[in-house]
Image: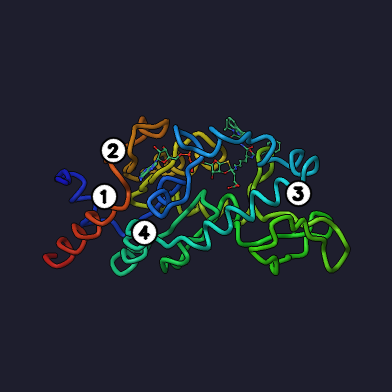
Amino acid sequence: MEFSTKFINKLKYAKKLLFFTGAGISAESGISTFRGVDGIWNKMKPEELASIDGFMKNPDIVWQWYQHRRQIVHDSKPNAGHLSIAELENYYDVTVVTENVDNLHRRAGSSKIFELHGNIERNYCIDCKAPFNDTKLNEESGNPKCKECGGRIRPDVVWFGEMLPQDQFSGGQSSAESSDICFVVGTSGLVYPAAYIPIEAKQAGAFIVEINIDYTEMSRFADESFIGKSASILTELLAEVKRIKATT
Ligand code: BJW
């Protein structure tokens, strides 16, 4: 891949990089995206599986679906995209703001991460909010109860109509406001308020770079769009940074 002179110059002088990531970055780790031909929402109804109403109506089905996805996450590994972002910490102040719940950035070694939609490897009690983390992956029809109060346990993810965790969102906003380059990787940019993060970065003066296999709602904000799979583009980005840092 040929990077433009303008982008290379941005990389030379940048100090703070923000990576705003979505499901596409984990596609090459074997985790399904949500939209698009093979996306989850093409086969399942979001209002039944990713809403509090759907959960209260059918907790067993929702619980089984999350246990199935936890197994996939558990069996998957960070790919070259996640690993390249983590390695970029050797050269820049890097923040990851992710819509993903799969923990792969943390497992790749990134140290500053804001998880806007929660984390599938955690649960909490709907009634007393106590964390509940000892569900076994093979408990197919778990639907466990809280040890403190007997309330129903739910996955610690953000469903439609729910507020994002305030500390994670405001942490993401602060990083957006101070970043020099904001990379928007593998997200359709359709889900709000998460999608405000790169827009806020742009408004604060960041250079916006989109990395995706296709153009998206975010493309109109991008100063550069790299169309292709994120694992290989991020690997090339890391190699370019190493070249720049070796000569400056
Ligand atoms: C590759 C690739 C490769 C593939 N390399 N690229 C303002 C305007 C309009 C609507 C709203 C608004 N504000 C709020 C809303 C409502 C709603 C919303 O946004 N709806 C839209 C869908 C219309 N938002 C909410 O409800 C949010 N809450 C909220 O607003 O609270 C405030 C409030 C509360 C009460 C009353 C009123 C207001 C919460 C949103 C929660 C989203 N939750 C989910 C599920 C998480 C749990 C779980 O995983 O089970 O989050 S939905 C799902 O979408 C998931 C994702 O994080 C999120 C984003 O998806 P993402 O990551 O972009 O994936 P895809 O599949 O869409 O795209 C993948 C991309 O990858 C594609 O572009 C591919 O091309 C690309 N790709 N392979 C590079 N190898």
Q: Where's residue 42, x and y in %?
A: 53, 32
Residues at circles 4 and 1 in contact by the CB criterion of under 8 Å: no
Whole-number angstrom distance, CA of label 1 to CA of label 2: 11 Å
Alpha carbons under labels 2 and 4: distance apart: 21 Å
Quadrant in which the C terminus is drawn: bottom left
Task: Confirm if mark 2 falls within 8 A of ligand 1.
Answer: no
Amino acid type at circle 2 is Ser
Circle number at residue 128: none
Name the residue at 20% across, 60% down: 239
Of marks 3 and 4, the one in the foreground: 3
**Circle 1 SS class:** helix
Say whether mark 1 is within 8 Å of ligand 1. Answer: yes
Residue labelled with disc 3: 60
Q: Determine the residue positioned at 18% across, 50% down.
A: 8
- Is 147 or 69 nearer to us in this picture? 69
Q: Amino acid at mark 3?
A: Asp
On the image, numbered disc 1 is attached to which residue?
233
Residue shown at the point (24%, 54%) measured from the top left: 237
Residue type indicated by callout 4:
Asn
The colour scheme applied to this rendered structure is rainbow
Asked whether disc 3 touches disc 4, contact meaning CB atoms under 8 Å apart, the reply is no
Give whichever of discs 1 and 3 has the lower sequence position. Answer: 3
The answer to whether the residues at label 2 and label 3 have Cβ atoms under 8 Å apart is no
Nearer to us of marks 1 and 2 is 1
